[in-house]
Image (cartoon, helix red, strand yellow):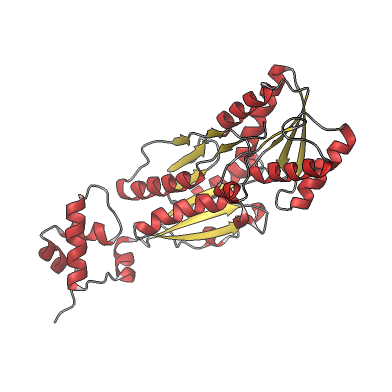
Amino acid sequence: MAKPNLHTVAAHAGVSIATVSKVVNGVRYGISEATLERVLASVSELGYRPNRSGRGLRTLRRSIIGMAIVDPSPTFLADPFTTNLVAGLSNYLSDRGFGLLLHGIKPKQVESSFLVKENVVDGLCLMLSGSAQLRRQNTKLFSTLSHPMVVFQDRAADGIPDTCFVNQDDAGGAKALAKLVLARQPKSVLIVIPDIFWPAIELRLEAYWQSMKSAGVAAKIIRCDESDPAAIAHAIEDQIEKAGLPDVIIGANDKIAIVALHSLEERGARVPEDVAVTGFNAFASNDYAGLDLTTARSPAYEMGELGGKLLLERLEGGEFEQREYTLPVGIVPGATV
């Protein structure tokens, strides 16, 4: 018996060859559930197995999306935001027959990175750290590869074609947290941020700083190595030794806020009576730890899903419908403010 091919599957399912091709390539757009089920049933019954290498040569599709995370930290995948975003992206692509090629890159090694040197993907996703100038330089470099791109957590930039920017409302979340803090009428606020430059942190910091400035509240900003709890604690303790307990500690993320809570507990300071504390992200690990932290909930997983959806729609339709998308950030009231 001859091996089944697209023609035999199409005839068996009573659909066009183009429809079968879309289904086996993981494309679901414009295909009804009934048609999808009929094609999949025919594929299963006939034992059809698509020839990926041959199909790749014919269509120049590899069914692989590249994800470049430009981060100086060797433990970049341990960051909860990164893991949630990558999980959303990977799961969305996997459900539609696409693989994800994940590559961690140091900020100054982008030019020599695998994703730049080897043309092995259909599209690219980027998440970049570094100064605004360096991020723009690296985004432009990736754009010269002529792949459609989705950039996570960075401001939309002109002069970069075939690119869509997917963000969360970091500034809005920070402003809402600042409003909760300011309701306590604090006299001093300590803002603790990572020593790595991330655009999302820049937006949060700007919103916190402007909110405090408008209210006439003194704010001090310190940086720390967020990958090391001991380094976070040292930075906070050092500042407290110099200036005394602040009325509020704002952590740029929950990791920093949690270390701040432990440091205050060791000092015998009451939260929130003596010092209020806020974080940012509200991932599930907070619930497992039994924390009732006042924070903002990041839609990182949903951002990953949306990025995957937009990129596959672009591959199918030929262009991005919008230049930029921003997902809302919700406030999670807790017992620390």
Nearest the viewer among 19 and 319 is 19
Place of residue 277 in the rendered image (x, y in percent of width and height, measured from the top left): 70, 35
- Is residue 161 at least partly visible in the picture? no
Residue 153 pos. (x, y %)? 54, 41
Location of residue 88 with respect to 185 vertically, above or below: below
Residue shown at the point (52%, 59%) measured from the top left? 102
161 vs 35: above or below: above
> Residue 59: horizontal and vertical position, in percent?
30, 61
Q: Which of the image's four quarters has the C terminus? A: top right
Residue at (69, 41) in percent of width and height: 257
Q: Left or right: where does residue 295 sit relative to residue 322?
A: right
Q: Residue furthest right?
A: 242
Give left or right: position of 156 versus 256: left
Tell whether 193 sits left or right of 44: right
Name the residue at the bottom extreme. 1
Q: For the point 67% across and 32% down, which residue is it? A: 205
Quadrant for the N terminus, please: bottom left
Query: In the rendering, at what x and y percent does residue 201 appear?
Result: 64, 38
Residue 296 seen: yes
Q: Is residue 227 above or below residue 221?
A: below
Whether residue 317 is situated above or below residue 173 in the rendered picture: below
User: Left or right: 225 with respect to 55?
Assistant: right
Nearest to the observer: residue 179 or residue 308: 179
Displayed quadrant of residue 263: top right
Question: Total of numbered circles in the picture?
Answer: 0
Residue visible at 74% across and 49% down? 225
